[in-house]
Amino acid sequence: MQRRELLKLSSLALVGMSVAPSLMAEKKRANKTNETLYLNFNENSLGMSEKAKQAVIDSLAVAYRYPDNQRAELITQLAKKYDVQDHFISLGNGSSENIQAVVQWLVYKARQAKQAVQLIVPEPTFDYAELYAKFLNVPVVKVPLTADFSFDLAKLQETAEQFSGLNIFYLCNPNNPTSAITPAKALFPWIKKAPENYFFLLDEAYAEFVQNPAFESGISLVKQGFKNVAVTRTFSKFYALAGYRVGYMLADPDVVLEVEKFMSIDNTNIVGAVAATASLQDQTFAQLSLQSNAESRRIVQNALKELGLKFVPSNGNFVFHEIKGNIKTYQERMKANRILVGREFLPIQGWNRLTLGTLEEMQYFVNVLKEFRKKGWV
């Protein structure tokens, strides 16, 4: 079924048509809209690759063994994908563990050197780095986004210049919840010229969805030998393995060696490892995931344009958009229509984050949103 869907999606892209009825019917069989639509946690509603499913089934025969071989194979495949050696990569229990370990290592390192440390984050952004820092009693400095929802790099830099200790920058690219990217031409020169007391934690959880040529992964900086950068990625989003908790970090081998001291041992189980490895090798599914998301994005953004609701052009599998109303009321009304949408991300008010689901799910959402407009709710 995945191959048929991919071919249909490719045809749609070529001729610029709206979603074909046959494709909509096929998606309906897999994702019935008489069930609740989970459009609130940026999961991938396509579900995992068929090859990943088979790999999971096959792994049951060796579930009594520790996952050393499967972990090693996943690391090798990731190293091959990014053209680096194995010791550039550290696996995580979701990329959240990688983020946590980087923060813990840097805080430990600073305190061993009797150096002050702070975490600098844009606001709003994904808050795990902030939570981990707070647990360690590390000050967190939040820098508001610009008027166009971009990172204020000048203000981030200014904030660091006023602090003599270790500055940890957490930068989610594309950013969550806005889905905006920070272009490499703006970000990379700053990182390359940064003083020794700056470290950049680049969270690229949604990078596989990006089709904007202005984006470039921070992995290129790692490969150039910069030791002030760690890049985290995940199999939760693009590869639809959120429940298996498989993430990873790419960094200079010296950084990996230190960060690994703060990671749990055997933190990737056999099922997650084999599913992730199989997903990397399933190019048909990768194309389906990318093109399905692009088409869902088109459906939603066109509807928002039609309704005159502002939105940030999406670079991930979610859209940050205006609703012109109270978020909690909007959530409740959507829930009454079996749609779960995102929460409010302060200090931005009157905007909502919507996960991009399957084509039929997004058409159903658009229909509900248009009904809301008729009632004067959005």
Image: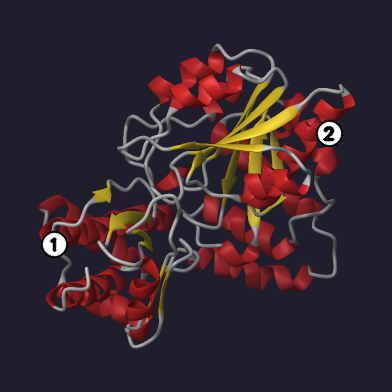
The coloring applied to the image is secondary structure
Q: Label 1, secondary structure: give it.
A: helix
Residue at horizontal 86%, vertical 23%? 114
* Quarter of the image with the N terminus in it: bottom left
Numbered label attached to residue 127: none
**Residue 91 seen from this side:** no
Q: Where in the figure is residue 27, as x and y percent of width and height? A: 30, 75
Quarter holding residue 249 = top right
Q: Residue at 64% of width from left, 64% of height from top?
A: 244
Seen in the image, is 221 located left or right of residue 287? right
Tell me the quadrant of the picture where the C terminus can be found.
Answer: bottom left
At which x and y percent is residue 364? 25, 76
Q: Residue at x 63, y 18 (%)?
A: 226
The three-letter code of the residue at mark 2 reads Tyr
- What's the residue type where badge 1 is placed? Leu
Q: Which mark is residue 108?
A: 2
* Residue density around tag 2, few if under 14, some if 14–19, many if 20 or more, within 10 Å: some
Mark 1 neighbour class, 10 Å CA radius: few under 14, some 14 to 19, many 20 or more: few
Q: Is residue 191 left or right of residue 309?
A: right
Q: Which mark sits nearer the N-terminus, 1 or 2?
A: 2
Q: Position of residue 155 (x, y in %)?
A: 47, 25
Give the answer, above or below, for where 97 lies relative to 183. Answer: below
Residue 34 appears in view: yes
Judged left or right of residue 324, residue 242 is right
- Residue name at image x 39 percent, y 37 percent: 181
Measured in 3D between alpha carbons, the distance from the residue under mark 1 to the one under mark 2, in whole angstroms, is: 51 Å
Instruction: Report if the CB atoms under discs 1 and 2 are less than 8 Å apart.
Output: no
222 or 105, which is in the foreground?
105
Name the residue carrying label 1.
Answer: 307
Q: Nearer the viewer, residue 7 or 140?
A: 140
